[in-house]
Image: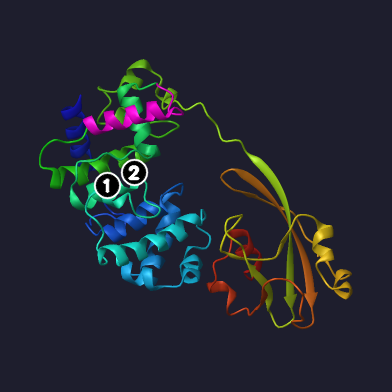
Amino acid sequence: MSAGLAARVVQWQQAHGRHDLPWQNTRDPYRVWLSEIMLQQTQVVTVLDYFGRFLARFPDVAALAAAPLDDVLGIWSGLGYYSRARNLHRCAQAVVALHGGAFPRSAEQLQSLPGIGRSTAAAVASLCFGERVAILDGNVKRVLTRALGYGADLASAAHERALWALATDLLPLDDLAQAMPRYTQGVMDLGATLCMARQPQCPRCPLADLCVARAQGQPQRYPVKTRKLKRSAQSLWLLWARSEDGQVWLSQRPTPGVWAGLYCLPLFDSPDELAAALPEPQRSSLQPGAVLRHVLTHKDLYLHPVQLQLPQALPLGLAGGWVAATQWPVLGLPAPIRKWLAPA
């Protein structure tokens, strides 16, 4: 199946794949790397706006490496999974310090950089440098397990390694400088536009007559992964202190932890803990607000805003400080906090 599958993907991508995304039609590893990190667990439509604004602020790896982390988190704010932004910054600094500002050209070297895993390294190496190396993100796993009828449980590391080997065997063999970028983009495009988790568009797929899952009539059976994330829930009370001149009290979250490194309203585990942290005269002015459920990867946060309106920016005796209305919009803020603070 190897040569036939790769050739079909290459031809299909050239004729029907995606060609108008801002990180395509380039061999610039900075742009490709940035897009790969942003697209992890994030939809393309969301990334489009962030990608442009990020490049406007940090046009190359040297600019990103030289920027303060707070600036990076500020631009990233709202995109979620903030460890990606911290690793992005660390990786840029490593590229400048260890590689003279030029990204390594092999997947093996790229994978040694902070925040770059095996699939991301392969994407950059194949798309930018034509290296014959396989990617295996969520979309690609779905395409390949269906095409091959690979029903082994990917919760097993051994089974995942076996799929990596199969993915490598399927790669193009000739004209790698041209075929590898086209194939890598094509297999991602198939997963994103035709071979979707629900309602796959099998009749339009270039692999339809090769696909084992389609022949079985069970495309949604693949991929198999039995281990599920154990979700938890946590309730937090947030002190939303404001002064009449528009200042808000913010503190920077510790690392590690929820919203690590971001600026946030002070968090407490209970309303009593929140009240006890304030000077006595201010406790009677607290006003509970509507609870917000905020979904993270592994847990649901139930956020209880507690408002405190003050005539002036008085000391609160808490970590952090008052931030002017002109200053907080550029800080790295968790998405729900930014929504609360933004004017209606």
Q: In the rendering, at what x and y percent does residue 23 appear? A: 30, 57
Q: Nearer the viewer, mark 1 or mark 2?
A: 1
Q: Is residue 207 visible?
A: yes
Q: Considering only vertical position in the picture, is 159 above or below 12?
A: above
The residue at the point 34 percent across, 32 percent down is 143
Q: In the rendering, at what x and y percent does residue 323 appear? A: 64, 78
Q: Of the two numbered discs 1 and 2 on the same chain, state the one appearing first in sequence.
A: 1
**Nearer to us in this view, 42 or 343:** 42
- Residue named by callout 2: 118
Which of the 4 image quarters holds residue 280? bottom right
User: Image check: 190 left or right of 271?
Assistant: left
Q: Considering only vertical position in the picture, is 327 above or below 237?
A: below
The residue at the point 30 percent across, 40 percent down is 135
Q: Residue furthest front?
A: 98
Which of the 4 image quarters holds residue 240? bottom right
- Residue named by callout 1: 108
Q: In the rendering, at what x and y percent does residue 33 appear? A: 32, 55
Q: Main secondary structure of the magenta part?
A: helix
| Residue 17 magenta | no
| Separation of marks 1 and 2 at Cα, in angstroms | 8 Å
Which of the 4 image quarters holds residue 270? bottom right
Quadrant where the C terminus sits is bottom right
Q: Residue 219's mark?
A: none
Q: Magenta part of the protein: which range? A: 152-169
